[in-house]
Every structure is written in C-alpha cells, then in structure tokens.
C-alpha cells in the first residue's frame, strides 16, 4: 500500500531495455473494435469474449532461451484446477501462473503452477506479486463510483467542471503531414466519456515517454487537455489510458487527497488488499514473478522487464498511474472481485451501492457504438472484468456467480500458451459449476 506521495515527476517505459511496438489489436464480444495504441487487451484470449492480438517485441538485447525439464516443475495434484496448466509449463509455453476461483462468499481454489523465475527454477508461490496493468482501470473506476455514490461528482458532468484546463478543448477535423484543421466538439467531454473510452482523448500524450509513470498525474492530465480530441465525444470507442488517468485526477480534486491515498483509505486497507500497490517494497519484489515473451523463433520463453514502467519499481519517484500502474496478488484481486460480485459489499461493509456496481459493469457506450464497455470494465451480458498488458485477467460471471483470476506475466506466448487461460476457466467451471446460491 502506498505511503506519502512523491513530489518529483516520473514517466513509463524502462530506458534502453526493451521497446514494445503494439500492432493492431482486435477485440470482439458480439462485434469487433480495432485501435492502434500501445496498451493491453481487456479480456483474455477466448475466455468468453473472443480475442486475438498481435505483438511485435524489439529487444535491445536478446536473452538465451530458457529450458526447464518437467521433473523440475512443482508437483500439482490431478484434482487441482490448475493441473490443466501443467502441460503448458512442461512445453515452455507458459512460465507459471497463480489462479483463483471464488464465489461471492469464499475462495474455492487458490493454486500455483510453474515458475516465478524459470532460469533459477524458483517455484511460483501462491502469493506471488504481478503487475496487473490495465486491471487498474477497473479499480480506479470503482474508487470513482464511491464519489458518485456520495453525490460529489456526476457521470454526465463535463470534465471541465472539475478540471478547468479542459475548457475550450479542440477536436481534430482533418489532418495530414502538412496541416491540421481544428474545430470545437459538439459538446465537452463528460465524466462518463473518460471512464468508457468514448471521449476522443488519445491513448497517451506525446509527453508520456519513454515510460508511462514519469509525469505527476496533474501534469499528465494537463497534457491531455492540450491535445485535440481525435473524434466527437460519444461517437466511437477508442481505448484510452488518458481518459482513465483523467478520472483519477478528478478523484484527487474532488476528494482533496492524492489519488493513491484515496485508493488506500477507501479500498485497499478496508478490503484487506495488503499487497496491492504502485510501488512494491523489498519483500514484495522478492515475490514478483519474472516477465516473459516468446523467443525469436517462438519455441521458448525469453525473460524481459516491464517496458512500460521505470525501474527500480520500488522507487517512489515513479508516479501512480490510474490506468495501469498497480501490482497485486491473486488473493487481493479476488477480494476486490468478491466485493463487486456482492453488489458493493464485502465482509459486512458496504463500499458501493448496488446501483453504482450495476452502472459501472453494464454497457455505458452510446447506443450507436457497438462496443460494450462499462465504466472501467469490459462487459458482456452479465460477464465483466478486465485484462492487463502482461496477460493477467479477472472475470466476474454474475450469471454463474463465479470469479476467476488468472495471474501470469507474459507479453505474448510461444506455441499454444495463449490457450492457457481458457483451459483454466473451463476447468474451473467444470469443477465448481454454478456457484450461485
């Protein structure tokens, strides 16, 4: 959990280790949406939302392939849900994973498989730490809805009501290499727009380089206000870190406390999310799972760093990023999801109204926009959740009353590793069936 706020700026993407170029990402629920940005998927491959993606990783220095024999792998019982992942580990398609299955009242399964560090043959512990990346968006949106419940902010208010720097924002009418024509949008962007990726704000601003965690939130948001919108608000869906970060800044202005402090005081501490933080401490870093990508010929795993963040990860000069900066464990994410599945309550304490939960986990994009996205949550017919850039995922199936959490650190998979999450979810559903009572 965070402590006192840092004063100096920081940005996202470690210097001179790995450069990531995200190619076209395609997400499909009942329909598809495409965008060209640098972020991660929302829900994981072929879970309930069909998903395909293509990644191109250009490394500053390639590491040697990492080979592990099956006998080095931690033992998994045949009755374990996670046993279905062992074959992926054995053939080097998956380094390791921690999985959690829960209903609204209890954890049904919390298991680990494979390795936290393949080269060192360090078994994956159940309390391993992971960078959960864009799963942070759902947490930020949930924190925001606390203020909506308290009547301190309204979803259809213009953002400029809380952040005056957005007054008079421009929209790009046309542009090419030689000119740009600007005009005023039909209406200012709203709070609902920034939380649902329908504002027209970019994925990130030109100032957010080389990493995404260098700028103080106030400065980052000012850079978004200076950037022309790319489309009319409400007219389309375009995945935007800038929008969620803007919502995080509104939390600061309305609550009168730093964004990360608000999360600590109103969510993490009362929920018992003791390992959820923007800055893993020394002990937590020892539990942080290594990150991997496919090697050059896609036959094995290659260790990498988290290219979107500045190192060292414990340095509090790095800035908290509402759209993707959190680290956590499967157990912590599970507690958060149980609160949401319970309609805003957990262990006798209410965090959100049922109406707030329903709003943020149901389609909030305009009727003319086919993409079904809520407020910080990907959603489809009672199933909602979010994924992260390193393939972590949380999914809440309110129809079954079942929560699945899949924690890995993969920027792409070799062989058929991208089928590992779907295999886990299938095993969880077969074992536990409908958890609804």
Image (tube, grey):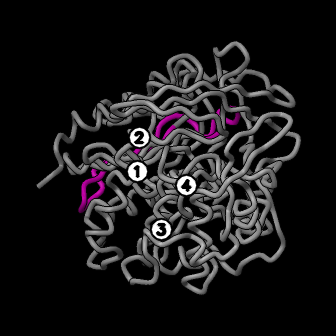
Q: Residues within 10 Å of mark 3 (few under 14, many from 20)?
A: many
In the rendered structure, find residue 371 and report the number of the disc placed on it. 2
- Residue 244 visible within the image: yes
Residue at (88, 41) in percent of width and height: 16
Instruction: Tell which circle, 2 or 1, labels the residue nearer the N-terminal end.
Output: 1
Q: Residues within 10 Å of mark 4 (few under 14, many from 20)?
A: many
Residue at (58, 32) in percent of width and height: 95
- Give the CA separation, mark 4 to mark 3: 31 Å
Residue 168 point in image, percent of width and height: 67, 67
Q: Which residue is mark 1?
A: 365
Magenta stretch contains residue 147: no
Q: Which residue is mark 3?
A: 273
Q: Is residue 296 above or below residue 365?
A: above
Foreground pick, 144 / 16: 144
In terms of secondary structure, where does tag 1 sit? loop
Q: Which residue is mark 4?
A: 199
Q: Is residue 38 above or below residue 228?
A: above
Magenta region, residue range = 97-122
What type of secondary structure mainly makes up the magenta span? strand
- Give the CA separation, mark 4 to mark 1: 10 Å
Residue at (32, 36) in percent of width and height: 81
- Give the CA separation, mark 2 to mark 3: 31 Å
Q: Is residue 298 above or below residue 192?
A: above
Residue 437 point in image, percent of width and height: 11, 55
Residue at (84, 72) in percent of width and height: 8
- Give the CA separation, mark 1 to mark 3: 30 Å
Instruction: Tell which circle, 4 or 3, labels the residue nearer the N-terminal end.
Output: 4
Q: Residues at badges 4 and 3 in contact (C-beta under 8 Å)?
A: no
Foreground pick, 387 / 282: 387
In terms of secondary structure, where does tag 2 sit? loop
């Amino acid at each position: 959990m965070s402590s006192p706020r840092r004063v100096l700026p920081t940005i996202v993407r470690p210097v001179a280790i790995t450069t990531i170029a995200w190619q076209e990402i395609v997400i499909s629920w009942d329909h598809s949406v495409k965008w060209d940005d640098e972020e991660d998927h929302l829900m994981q491959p072929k879970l309930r939302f069909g998903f395909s993606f293509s990644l191109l990783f250009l490394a500053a220095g390639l590491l040697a392939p990492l080979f592990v024999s099956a006998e080095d792998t931690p033992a998994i019982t045949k009755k374990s849900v996670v046993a279905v992942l062992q074959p992926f580990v054995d053939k080097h398609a998956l380094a390791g994973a921690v999985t959690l299955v829960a209903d609204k009242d209890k954890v049904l399964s919390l298991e680990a498989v494979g390795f936290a560090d393949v080269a060192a043959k360090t078994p994956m512990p159940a309390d391993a730490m992971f960078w959960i990346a864009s799963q942070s968006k759902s947490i930020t949106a949930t924190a925001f809805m606390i203020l909506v419940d308290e009547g301190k902010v309204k979803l259809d208010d213009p953002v400029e009501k809380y952040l005056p720097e957005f007054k008079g924002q421009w929209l790009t009418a046309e542009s090419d290499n030689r000119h740009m024509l600007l005009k005023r949008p039909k209406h200012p962007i709203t709070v609902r727009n920034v939380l649902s990726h329908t504002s027209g704000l970019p994925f990130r601003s030109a100032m957010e380089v080389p990493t995404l965690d260098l700028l103080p939130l106030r400065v980052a948001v000012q850079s978004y206000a200076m950037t022309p919108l790319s489309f009319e608000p409400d007219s389309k869906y375009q995945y935007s870190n800038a929008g969620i970060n803007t919502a995080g800044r509104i939390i600061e202005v309305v609550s009168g406390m730093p964004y990360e402090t608000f999360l600590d005081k109103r969510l993490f501490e009362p929920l018992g999310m003791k390992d959820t933080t923007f800055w893993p401490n020394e002990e937590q870093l020892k539990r942080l799972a290594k990150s991997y990508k496919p090697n050059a010929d896609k036959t094995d795993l290659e260790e990498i760093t988290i290219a979107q963040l500045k190192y060292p990860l414990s340095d509090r000069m790095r800035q908290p990023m509402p759209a993707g900066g959190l680290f956590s464990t499967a157990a912590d994410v599970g507690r958060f999801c149980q609160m949401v599945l319970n309609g805003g309550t957990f262990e006798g304490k209410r965090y959100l109204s049922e109406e707030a939960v329903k709003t943020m986990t149901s389609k909030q994009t305009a009727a003319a926009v086919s993409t079904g996205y809520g407020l910080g949550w990907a959603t489809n017919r009672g199933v909602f959740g979010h994924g992260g850039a390193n393939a972590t995922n949380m999914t809440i199936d309110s129809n079954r009353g079942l929560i699945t959490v899949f924690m890995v650190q993969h920027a792409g998979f070799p062989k058929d590793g991208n089928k590992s999450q779907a295999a886990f979810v299938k095993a969880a559903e077969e074992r536990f069936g409908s958890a609804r009572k």
